[in-house]
Image: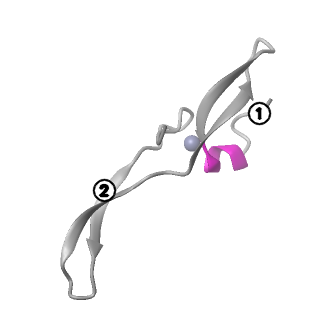
Amino acid sequence: MAKCEICNKNVHFGNNVSHSHRKSRKMWKPNVKSVRVKTEGGGTKKMNVCTACLRSGKVERA
Ligand SMILES: [Zn+2]
Protein backbone atom coordinates (compact mmCIF):
# COMPACT_ATOMS: atom_id res chain seq x y z
CA MET A 1 0.00 0.00 0.00
CA ALA A 2 0.90 3.72 0.22
CA LYS A 3 1.61 3.73 -3.52
CA CYS A 4 -0.93 4.32 -6.30
CA GLU A 5 -0.69 1.75 -9.12
CA ILE A 6 -2.20 4.23 -11.62
CA CYS A 7 -0.20 7.45 -11.17
CA ASN A 8 2.70 6.09 -9.04
CA LYS A 9 1.98 8.61 -6.27
CA ASN A 10 4.14 7.63 -3.30
CA VAL A 11 5.20 8.82 0.15
CA HIS A 12 7.14 12.08 0.46
CA PHE A 13 9.20 13.62 3.23
CA GLY A 14 9.58 16.90 5.08
CA ASN A 15 9.88 18.34 8.55
CA ASN A 16 7.48 18.67 11.44
CA VAL A 17 8.19 22.10 12.93
CA SER A 18 7.22 22.63 16.57
CA HIS A 19 6.25 25.96 18.11
CA SER A 20 9.85 26.32 19.41
CA HIS A 21 11.00 25.64 15.85
CA ARG A 22 12.59 22.26 16.56
CA LYS A 23 12.36 20.05 13.47
CA SER A 24 11.80 16.33 13.17
CA ARG A 25 11.44 14.24 10.03
CA LYS A 26 7.92 13.57 8.84
CA MET A 27 6.51 11.29 6.16
CA TRP A 28 3.29 12.01 4.22
CA LYS A 29 1.34 9.11 2.77
CA PRO A 30 -1.09 9.47 -0.14
CA ASN A 31 -4.72 8.46 0.45
CA VAL A 32 -4.55 5.05 -1.24
CA LYS A 33 -7.43 2.57 -1.20
CA SER A 34 -7.41 -1.11 -2.13
CA VAL A 35 -10.28 -1.44 -4.64
CA ARG A 36 -11.59 -4.04 -7.08
CA VAL A 37 -11.41 -2.56 -10.60
CA LYS A 38 -12.66 -3.75 -14.00
CA THR A 39 -10.01 -4.92 -16.49
CA GLU A 40 -10.15 -4.77 -20.32
CA GLY A 41 -10.98 -8.48 -20.57
CA GLY A 42 -14.16 -8.02 -18.56
CA GLY A 43 -12.70 -9.44 -15.36
CA THR A 44 -11.87 -7.75 -12.10
CA LYS A 45 -8.69 -7.36 -10.10
CA LYS A 46 -7.65 -5.72 -6.86
CA MET A 47 -5.45 -2.64 -7.13
CA ASN A 48 -4.10 0.05 -4.84
CA VAL A 49 -5.50 3.30 -6.20
CA CYS A 50 -5.26 6.82 -4.74
CA THR A 51 -8.51 8.68 -4.13
CA ALA A 52 -7.54 11.35 -6.70
CA CYS A 53 -7.48 8.66 -9.44
CA LEU A 54 -10.77 7.20 -8.17
CA ARG A 55 -12.44 10.61 -8.28
CA SER A 56 -11.15 11.50 -11.75
CA GLY A 57 -12.45 8.22 -13.19
CA LYS A 58 -9.09 6.77 -14.23
CA VAL A 59 -10.31 3.35 -13.12
CA GLU A 60 -13.76 1.78 -13.24
CA ARG A 61 -14.79 0.10 -10.01
CA ALA A 62 -16.23 -3.39 -10.22
ZN1 LIG B 1 -3.28 7.82 -8.38
Residue sitting at x 60%, y 38%: 49
- Mark 1 C-beta to ligand 1 under 8 Å: no
Q: Nearer the viewer, residue 41 or 23?
A: 23
Picture quadrant where residue 33 is located: top right
Give the label on residue 28, or none. none
Q: Which residue is mark 1?
A: 60
Q: Is there a contact, CB below 8 Å, between mark 2 and mark 1?
A: no
Mark 2: amino acid: Phe
Question: What residue is pinned by disc 2?
Answer: 13
Q: Quadrant of the C terminus?
A: top right
**Residues in magenta, as a range:** 50-55
**Where does the image place residue 56, in percent across and percent down from the top left?**
70, 47
Element carrying mark 2: strand
Q: Is residue 22 above or below residue 60?
A: below
Relative to residue 5, is residue 41 depicted above or below? above
Q: Residues within 10 Å of mark 2 (few under 14, many from 20)?
A: few
On screen, residue 30 versus residue 14, left or right, reads: right
Q: Nearer the viewer, residue 30 or 40?
A: 30
State the image quarter where residue 54 is shown.
Answer: top right
| First along the sequence among labels 2 and 1 | 2
Left or right: residue 32 compared with residue 17: right
Residue 57 covered by magenta stretch: no
Q: CA distance from mark 2 to mark 1?
A: 31 Å
Q: Locate residue 10 relative to residue 16 in the image: left or right.
A: right
Extreme residue in the bottom direction = 20
